[in-house]
Image: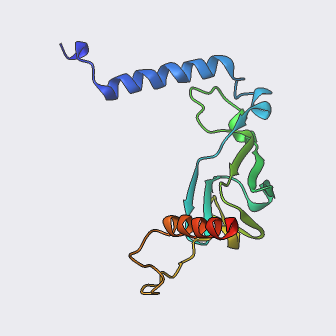
Amino acid sequence: MNGLTRTPARELSLLRREMDRLFNDFLPARQGEGASTSVWMPRADLAETDDAWLLSLDLPGLTADDVEVTMEDDTLTVSGERQASRDQQEGRFHRIERNYGRFFRTVQFATPVDADNIEASFEDGVLTIRIAKAEASKPRRIEVRGGTGRHTSEGDGHNADARQLEVNTADSSS
């Protein structure tokens, strides 16, 4: 009876397995020559503060020299390549889940960024990039003043303009 019950978690698990099967059918194998031609995207976290964007990417097994970071027109691109080690190419694989080959990750920012103020650091397999926002896109506090005495109870300004227009029209006809 338990096998007949449909649960969202079970349905999602079945969907994921089916999607994995489809991708495995259409993407090149990750052994031999296919490993150097496959492209993958590292997992990333993107956070926003008032003055910057913070991007962290998981790149285990790589060094800072293996990674290239470029910025063009408010679009940041992180790329590189992870080679399969010689030890891993020997033997018969039963499961390959780690990604090898070229990787790309591109982030386009909705707000202008300061391309001259970008910092990147690589520690323990995590690449962290701080992208400063342009001054124009940073939030700023606008002072609201009260009690200026300009608002009167005689109208909303639109009616006052209309009355002024009528007076000018009458003066020009006399």
Nearer-the-camera pick, 36 or 157: 157
39 relative position to 163: left or right: right
Residue at x-position 71% and y-position 62%? 112
Residue 60 percent across, percent down from the top left: 63, 52
47 relative position to 42: left or right: left
State which quadrant residue 95 falls in.
top right
Residue with the most extreme front position: 174
Nearer-the-camera pick, 153 or 107: 153
Residue 30 percent across, percent down from the top left: 70, 29
Does 174 sit above or below residue 14? below
The quadrant of the picture occupied by the N terminus is: top left
Nearer-the-camera pick, 133 or 70: 133
State which quadrant residue 162 falls in.
bottom right
The quadrant of the picture occupied by the C terminus is: bottom right
Nearer-the-camera pick, 110 or 15: 110
Does 94 sit above or below residue 119? above
Residue at x-position 46% and y-position 68%? 156
> What is the image's colouring?
rainbow
Does 81 sit above or below residue 138? above
Residue 106 percent across, percent down from the top left: 71, 47
Residue at x-position 69% and y-position 68%? 172
The answer, for residue 139, to whether it is visible in the render is: yes
Residue 138 percent across, percent down from the top left: 62, 71
State which quadrant residue 39 falls in.
top right
68 relative position to 13: left or right: right
Residue with the most extreme left position: 1
The answer, for residue 121, to whether it is visible in the render is: no
Residue with the most extreme bottom position: 148
Residue at x-position 61% and y-position 72%? 51
